[in-house]
Amino acid sequence: MLSLLSCTKTIYTHEQVIDRYKTKQDVTKTFGIPTEKRMEDNYEEWLYRYDKYDSFTEHSVKEYHNTQTTIVTDFNKYNRYLKFTFDLQGNVTRCDYTGVDFTVKGKDKGATIALVISGTALVVGIVLLATRSTVSNWYSF
């Protein structure tokens, strides 16, 4: 049972992942076409809509599948989204998000091994105490 509860560690934080995207090309390569675009005189914003999985087994979110981008004057309200702001040269100047987390996690083998060893030691200790208690009660008769 303890091996099923393996430990994880953070490899990259959400902010570290988001900071990788420096240009429109970087964003498009990873996220594809945005759900909505908003244009101003000196900047452009792209919004990516995300939906929560319907399954009880999944606790993350997935990107809403777009087939085309809608040009808007004001973004629609979504519970989960990722929004990039670009300057006129196409460089990312800002990133806003709500309800999404791009943290990259991996298994922490050391912590998992320590957890298994601790659990095993605990079970062995309880068994020894129970056995000792039963044997001493048996000799008292």
Image: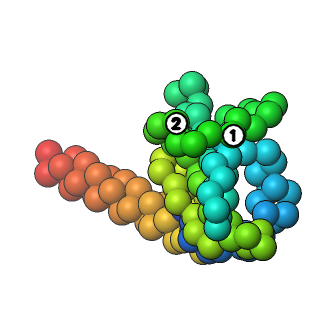
Give percent across and percent down for residue 31. 76, 51
Q: Amino acid at mark 1?
A: Ile
Q: Nearer the viewer, residue 53 or 92?
A: 92
Left or right for 42, reference 141: right
- Identify the colour scheme used: rainbow
* Nearer to us: label 2 or label 1: 1
Q: What amino acid type should be assigned to the residue bearing mark 2?
A: Asn
97, above or below 11, in the image: above
Front-most of residues 124 and 62: 62
**Residue drawn 81% across the image and 48% down it:** 32
Q: Residue at x 23, y 54 (%)?
A: 133
* SS assignment at label 1: strand
Q: Nearer the viewer, residue 102 or 93?
A: 93
> Is 97 above or below relative to 43?
above
Q: Residue at x 28, y 59 (%)?
A: 129
The label shown at residue 42 is: none
Res 5 seen here: no
Q: CA distance from mark 2 to mark 1?
A: 11 Å
Q: Label 2: which residue?
A: 76
Q: Which residue is mark 1?
A: 71
